[in-house]
Amino acid sequence: MEDFKSGLNIIVDFDGTVVTHDYPSIGKDIGAIPILKELVRNGHGLILFTMRSGKELDEAVEWFKKNDIPLYGIQTNPTQHEWTTSPKAYGQLIIDDIGLGCPTKFDLNLSNRKFVDWVKVQQMLKELNLIVCPLCGNRGEYVIGGSFGESVQIVKCNCKKI
């Protein structure tokens, strides 16, 4: 797991959130990869918090490794044992397809169940100043490219440094 540097502890669900619902298999890519990488690049720690356990949890953790997305915690915040015995993972933000207010969408070409709309999540994160352009520090006018498994890259920014 990655050492936490600064920023928020962000709890992230797996099925329906970073991939489509296809449990017990790993679902299809829904565009989470570049946004999750951007959150880590901006100093936030990702905590995987899912109903998966055993082999299925190991496969979800492997998905993060395969996509070069470091996790700060798995099923728990690694520092919370110092101040609580609660099994609920502690974080300042939760991204979960069943969370009230989390933007979701249907795309029958990918899944017969709703899943997180990462284009809208990206915009919300920019509005909350949680992700910034790595070229100029701009907090809202840049566009992250490289969705669906490609590498993260800035494809448009008002700073004109691209």
Image (spheres, helix red, strand yellow):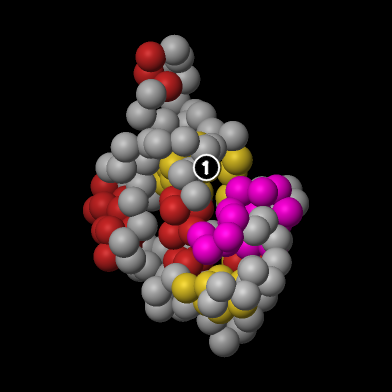
Q: Identify which residue, 146 or 64, lies in the foreground.
A: 146
Query: Is 126 drawn above or below residue 153 in the view shown?
Result: above
Q: Could you tell me which residue is drawn at 59 percent across and 55 percent down?
A: 137
Say whether residue 138 is left or right of residue 6.
right
Query: Is 140 drawn above or below residue 160 in the view shown?
Result: above
What x and y, as percent, mark residue 103? 70, 61
- Can I make out residue 26 in this image? yes
Quarter of the image that includes the N terminus: top left
Q: Which span is picked out in magenta? A: 122-137
- Can I make out residue 30 in this image? no
Instruction: Name the amino acid type tagged 1.
Output: Ile
The crowd level at tag 1 (other Cα within 10 Å; few <14, some 14-19, many 20+) is many
What x and y, as percent, mark residue 5? 40, 36
The residue labelled by disc 1 is: 10
Quarter of the image that includes the C terminus: bottom right
The reply to whether the magenta stretch includes residue 130 is yes
Q: Identify which residue, 3 or 103, lies in the foreground.
A: 3
How many callouts does the rendering have? 1
The reply to whether the magenta stretch includes residue 26 is no
Say whether residue 124 is left or right of residue 5.
right
Q: Identify which residue, 1 or 130, lies in the foreground.
A: 130
What x and y, as percent, mark residue 78? 36, 29
Magenta segment's dominant SS is loop
Secondary structure at badge 1 equals strand
Residue at the far top in the pictured view: 83
Q: Could you tell me which residue is drawn at 44 percent across and 53 percent down?
A: 41
Give residue 108's quadrant in the image: bottom right
What x and y, as percent, mark residue 17? 54, 60
Q: Could you tell me which residue is drawn at 41 percent across and 31 percent down?
A: 77
Query: Is 71 drawn above or below residue 160 in the view shown?
Result: above
Q: Could you tell me which residue is drawn at 37 percent across and 41 percent down?
A: 72
Residue at the far bottom in the pictured view: 109
